[in-house]
Amino acid sequence: NAGVTQTPKFQVLKTGQSMTLQCAQDMNHEYMSWYRQDPGMGLRLIHYSVGAGITDQGEVPNGYNVSRSTTEDFPLRLLSAAPSQTSVYFCASSGPGAWGTQYFGPGTRLLVL
Amino acid sequence: GQQVMQIPQYQHVQEGEDFTTYCNSSTTLSNIQWYKQRPGGHPVFLIQLVKSGEVKKQKRLTFQFGEAKKNSSLHITATQTTDVGTYFCAGLAAGNKLTFGGGTRVLVKP
């Protein structure tokens, strides 16, 4: 099992550009989440999903969109990137239960200029 | 909303010494989880505590959940260079989502 995979590993964007961060898991977990990590601020929840077709907002959802068409995939979309979105993004899956053990992917390091 | 605070933010430890990092929640928790993130890596689950006053050990790591279920601690004995990284606690309160603390970054001096 690959666990949770994320692409790309690194990305540089210009302000106003859009992009999609990909996340996939092969553990058949119902629950998936996106976090951002900034120095000294821990991991903050952006969006999460409790199953295919169901998503909800976390602590810092503004500027991000998500969808969940399959159990395996949970992409995160930045519609118009801003410098404040420079961060490291982690996708996680969990199961059983939405807030059980979080299995994190390797992360995407994003720089917005 | 629910807040989870960790202290200290940084911990410089001499190799072989012990140290403790603390986690405090603004609300009573259903459970608390601990994660370790090595430099450049991703958070990895260490343990979950559920019961009031619960104590669990993993080799040199001792985890404790407070009696009021609002605080937790991680104690590491005989620190080794392999303990370098950031330790996060994450608390779950009823009806809420998992909330991570800011982490304690541990640096080990050989």
Image (spheres, coloured by chain):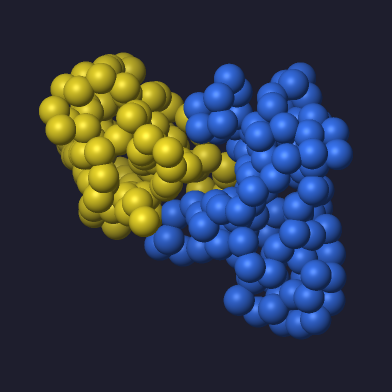
**Residue at 43% from the left image edge and 42% from the top image edge:** B96
Please state which of residues B17 and B76 is positioned toward the viewer in this rendering: B76
> What residue do we see at 60% from left, 23% from top?
A95
Does residue B60 appear in this view? no
A93 to B97, vertically: above or below: above
* Position of the N terminus of chain A by quadrant: top right
Is residue A30 placed above or below A44 in the rendered structure?
above
Looking at the image, residue A11 sits to the left or right of residue B80; the answer is: right
Q: Quadrant of the C terminus of chain A?
A: bottom right
Query: Residue B5's spot in the image, x, y percent?
Result: 28, 53
Note the chain letter of the blue one: A
Expressed as whole percent of the image width and height from the top left, the position of residue B95 reads 42, 38
Q: Is residue A113 left or right of residue B35?
A: right
Is there any visible trace of residue B35 in the rendered image?
yes
Residue A65 sits above or below residue A81 on the image: above
Q: Residue B97's spot in the image, x, y percent?
A: 47, 42
Q: Position of residue B54 (x, y in %)?
A: 21, 19
- What colour has chain B? yellow
Q: B37 and A25: which one is in front?
A: A25
Residue at 25% of width from left, 50% of height from top? B26
Q: Is residue A103 left or right of residue B67?
A: right
